[in-house]
Image (spheres, rainbow, N blue to C red):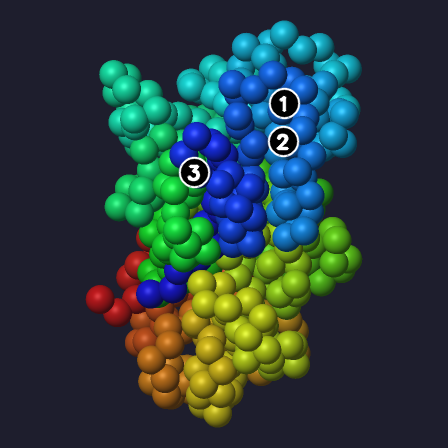
């Protein structure tokens, strides 16, 4: 079972630690995805002084610093990322908001989230999910509430309130992009260890069932239709993993697409894999990469990305499969099992060849190449853990329906 990355936002509260700046430095050194400088009890001048020091610490470690509530202070310090409570957001006009590169909003309902989106929020925090000492007497809204909001709004949602290592998994499973932590991180003697533990606890988990219906994008097959709408249709139809494949995109274009698709896929608790460009995958916060024999070696990607980053490898021979396993791959892509419209010169893999490759290691293997509703059931005796499809989904007039039918058929070819 492979653990995928989960995003962690650390929220400060200097009342919880004896030496605030020493603790803030330890937290920043642990490299969370963001630090929000809360400290709402300060005057504006006091907050500005604190923010300047916090900015220096966060800049030192390359961590995003987001200021909280104090709009004019953010402008004076030069921090273009702000977290706004709903009443503050409602009191600002658009010209004040546009100064910021990024606006997060504290929300407590789906209606709040929709309003935040209309006011150009980049992300929202949503709470409180569980009972917490910070909100004594107010019961947590629960995971079901979190799930409903995540499905209702097309923004990254970060859950907040009473989340610990025992509850974190339920939060991500509900569709949250990540979690916010305050008391636990401000009190943690070893913030690096704590962030690793919370990421492990709250992350999606990938096993071979994620390969059941592996949909690979092809914008050419979409014939002008919107990529993101197409991917969401595939997710609604039951795709269990999405791969972003765009050979013509620049590194930046691929990174931008991957970042947006990762947020979309995570709302459906589905991993997003990037084809070939592991640097784009890492920069975008995607769940992993798939590489061929002529791409960056699996061992190098594993060394740079570490554990928890999914690496798929193409294997057309037993030797390639064993090498991928030895270098740290998590799954194999084996094909082409049929003539493929996307790879006309692909080497054909017979049923016997597929079975030999699959049985040569303990890695799960997904069949790929020319798979459609008409031939997928002939893969039943191959030993495949799923089917990777391109045109069969994305060239279909009704992508959601095509994915739903293929998901059902894929279930029939997988060994129980």
Q: Mark 2–mark 1 contact, CB under 8 Å?
A: yes
Q: Residues within 10 Å of mark 3 (few under 14, many from 20)?
A: some
Residue 178 rendering spot, x and y as whole percentages: 45, 42
Pointer 1 residue = 46
Residue 330 in view (yes/no): yes
Residue 179 in view (yes/no): no
In this rendered view, identify the residue nearer to me: 85 or 144. Answer: 85
**Label 3 or label 2, whichever comes before in sequence order:** 3
- The residue located at (53%, 25%) in the rendering is 39
Residue 265 rendering spot, x and y as whole percentages: 49, 45
Residue 74 rendering spot, x and y as whole percentages: 70, 26
Name of the residue lying farthest toward the top: 91
Placement of 108 over or under 81, stated as above or below: above
The C terminus, quarter of image = bottom left
Name of the residue lying farthest toward the front: 18
Q: Residues within 10 Å of mark 1 (few under 14, many from 20)?
A: few
Image mark for residue 17: 3
The N terminus, quarter of image = bottom left
Q: CA distance from mark 3 to mark 2?
A: 15 Å
Q: CA distance from mark 2 to mark 1?
A: 6 Å
Label 1 residue SS: helix
- The residue located at (46%, 56%) in the rendering is 192
* Left or right placement of residue 302 versus residue 404 in this view: right
Image mark for residue 117: none
Placement of 267 over or under 85, stated as above or below: below
Pointer 2 residue = 50
In this rendered view, identify the residue nearer to me: 49 or 245. Answer: 49
> What is the number of callouts on the image?
3
- The residue located at (74%, 51%) in the rendering is 253
- The residue located at (59%, 78%) in the rendering is 300
Q: Residues within 10 Å of mark 2 (few under 14, many from 20)?
A: some
């Amino acid at each position: 079972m492979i653990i995928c990355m989960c995003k962690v936002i650390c929220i400060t509260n200097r009342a919880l630690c004896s030496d605030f700046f020493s603790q803030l430095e330890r937290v920043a050194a642990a490299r969370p995805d963001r630090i929000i400088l809360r400290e709402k009890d300060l005057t504006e001048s006091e907050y500005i002084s604190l923010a300047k020091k916090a900015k220096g610490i966060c800049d030192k470690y390359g961590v995003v610093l987001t200021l909280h509530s104090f709009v004019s202070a953010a402008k004076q310090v030069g921090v273009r990322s702000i977290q706004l409570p709903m009443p503050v957001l409602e009191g600002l006009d658009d010209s004040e908001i546009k100064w910021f590169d990024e606006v997060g909003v504290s929300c407590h309902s789906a209606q709040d989230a929709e309003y935040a989106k209309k006011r150009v929020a980049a992300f929202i925090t949503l709470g409180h999910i569980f009972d917490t000492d910070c909100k004594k007497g107010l019961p947590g809204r629960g995971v079901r509430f979190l799930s409903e909001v995540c499905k209702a709004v097309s923004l990254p949602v970060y859950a907040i309130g009473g989340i610990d290592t025992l509850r974190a998994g339920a939060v991500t499973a509900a569709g949250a992009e990540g979690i916010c932590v305050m008391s636990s991180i401000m009190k943690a003697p070893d913030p690096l260890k704590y962030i690793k533990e919370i990421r492990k606890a709250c992350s999606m988990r990938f096993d071979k069932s994620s390969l059941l219906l592996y949909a690979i994008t092809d914008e050419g097959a979409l014939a002008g239709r919107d990529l993101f709408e197409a991917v969401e249709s595939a997710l609604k139809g039951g795709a269990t993993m999405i791969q972003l494949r765009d050979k013509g995109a620049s590194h930046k274009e691929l990174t931008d697409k991957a970042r947006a698709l990762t947020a979309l896929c995570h709302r459906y608790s589905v991993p997003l894999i990037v084809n070939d460009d592991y640097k784009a995958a890492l920069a975008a916060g995607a769940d992993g990469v798939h590489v061929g024999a002529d791409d960056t070696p699996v061992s190098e990607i594993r060394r740079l990305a570490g554990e928890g980053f999914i690496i798929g490898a193409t294997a057309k021979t037993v030797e390639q499969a064993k090498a991928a396993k030895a270098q740290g791959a998590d799954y194999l892509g084996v094909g082409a099992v049929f003539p493929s419209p996307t790879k006309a010169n692909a080497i054909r893999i017979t049923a016997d060849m597929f079975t030999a490759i699959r049985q040569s290691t303990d890695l799960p293997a997904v069949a790929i190449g020319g798979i459609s509703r008409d031939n997928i059931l002939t893969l039943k005796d191959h030993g495949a853990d799923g089917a990777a499809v391109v045109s069969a989904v994305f060239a279909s007039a009704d992508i959601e329906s095509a994915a739903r039918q293929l998901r059902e058929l894929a279930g029939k070819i997988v060994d129980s």
